[in-house]
């Protein structure tokens, strides 16, 4: 199993708009081979993390090179909501 996460630092006062953007966007993940689940996590001080679970790292990498990935990320919508670019972290589950 592989877990892919992006950490977002949201501008003060933009949390509700950021959450709404994620609720309304089409992820294009349904039917992607190897995709298992997605969650948007909310921390403190404007930190959000997108958390997706995949069968394998290869399935995740294939998603990042797919047309579905391009369509999902072409939606934009976070302009003015973020303090910088998201930070990616990927992890293989060992236990």
Image (cartoon, grey):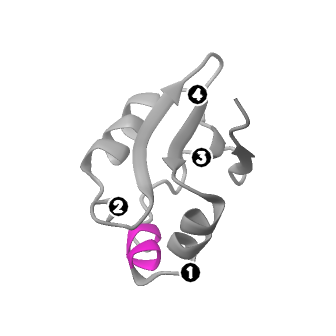
Q: Is residue 14 visible?
A: no
Residue 1 has which mark?
Answer: 3
The residue identified by callout 2 is: 29
The numbered mark, 1 or 2, whose residue comes first in the sequence reads 2
Q: Main secondary structure of the magenta part?
A: helix
The numbered mark, 2 or 4, whose residue comes first in the sequence reads 4
| Magenta region | 68-73
Q: Residues within 10 Å of mark 2 (few under 14, many from 20)?
A: some
Asked whether, in this view, residue 77 is left or right of residue 41, the answer is: left
Front in this rendered view, residue 12 or 37: 37
Residue 12 has which mark?
Answer: 4
Residue at point 28% right, 60% down?
30
- Camera-near label (1 vs 4) is 1
Q: Quadrant of residue 20?
A: top left
Q: Is residue 22 above or below residue 47?
A: below
Whether the magenta-drawn stretch holds residue 88 is answered as no
Residue at point 47% right, 81% down?
66
The residue identified by callout 1 is: 65
Question: Marks 1 and 2, Cα distance to the nearest angstrom?
Answer: 13 Å
The numbered mark, 2 or 3, whose residue comes first in the sequence reads 3
Q: Is residue 57 visible?
A: yes
Q: Residues within 10 Å of mark 3 (few under 14, many from 20)?
A: some
Q: Residues within 10 Å of mark 1 (few under 14, many from 20)?
A: few
């Amino acid at each position: 199993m592989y877990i892919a996460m992006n950490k977002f630092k949201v501008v003060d006062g933009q949390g509700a708009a950021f959450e709404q953007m994620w609720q309304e966007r089409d992820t294009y993940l349904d039917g992607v081979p190897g995709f298992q689940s997605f969650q948007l996590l909310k921390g403190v001080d404007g930190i959000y993390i997108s958390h997706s679970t995949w069968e394998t790292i290869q399935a995740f990498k294939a998603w990042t090179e797919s047309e579905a990935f391009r369509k999902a990320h072409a939606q934009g919508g976070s302009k003015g909501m973020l303090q910088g670019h998201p930070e990616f972290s990927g992890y293989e589950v060992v236990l």
